Image (tube, grey):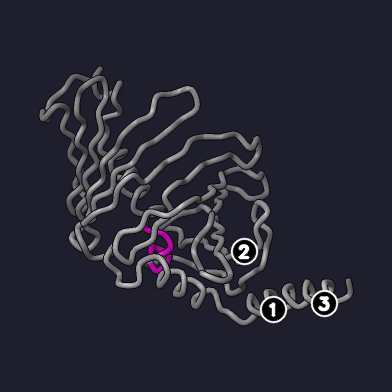
Amino acid sequence: MKNHIVIIFLLVFVNTISSQNITPEDLISKSIQYHDPSGLLMKKDVSMLFTGTRPGGEDSKTTVVFNIKKETFQMENMRDEMSIVSSVDKGNATILLDGKKEYSDEMKEKYRLDPKRVVMMKNYYQYLWLMPMKLNDPGTIIDPEVKQVDFFGEDLLQVKVSYSPEVGKDVWYFYFNPTSYAMQGYRFYHDEAKNDGEYILLEDEAIYENIRLPQKRTWYTHKEDKLLGTDILDKLSF
């Protein structure tokens, strides 16, 4: 019994020491080496196929193609048997509904054909699906302390991130495996004192050559623990 206690103490001690010795920059760097060691996602034409599930709704399929260096992005999905192709080229957004640039105001409202929303969706996909690589972006403010915390039953390393005002106002927390440095979840708050925002659990991996991305992301609200939906990465290619 004493031996078991000693072993447990040593494991806790080693984990605590490791979280104290590693800087957040080193932790993020090690996580990037785990997920995308060659940096391909940040410099190649990337194609991703997703399945989205929402409570009470039908599953949806979305294809996203982008190139970070060229500042290009394209998203394609189907609504009511019509294709919607949304693109951003160096900040300029265009939307095609069944190949047409012109459509009625009713169609714009029904299918949310708004250039501002296209830019928002570009930021959404590239920010979350290119984590932790995007933590090197300009305007990212990384808290100097790495904490060892319990994240839904797992002992993980936590890094707190905020942003300069021109980039964003939310506060984010990212959670990493202390052994492999894989990212295993994150959460964000608009106002942490109000416990608003959401947390995201990551499961499984999509592997392409030496790239490893979380395959399944499930979203919940902080306040109600309400399930918002799940996004699954079905295919990753270049």
The CA distance from mark 2 to mark 3 is: 21 Å
Q: Of all residues shown, which one is farthest toward the right?
A: 2
Mark carried by residue 186: none
- Which picture quadrant has residue 58? top left
Q: Residue at x 56, y 40 (%)?
A: 220
Magenta span = 130-136
Please, is residue 59 above or below residue 202 in the view?
above
Residue to which mark 2 is pinned? 156
Q: Which one is earlier in the sequence, the residue at label 2 or at label 1?
A: 1
Q: Of all residues shown, which one is farthest toward the bottom?
A: 21
Residue to which mark 1 is pinned? 14
Percent x, y of residue 172? 54, 56
Please, is residue 198 above or below residue 165 in the view?
above
Alpha-carbon neighbours of circle 3 within 10 Å: few (<14), some, or many (≥20)? Answer: few
Number of residue marks: 3
Instruction: Determine the secondary structure under disc 2.
Output: strand
Type of residue at label 3?
Answer: Val
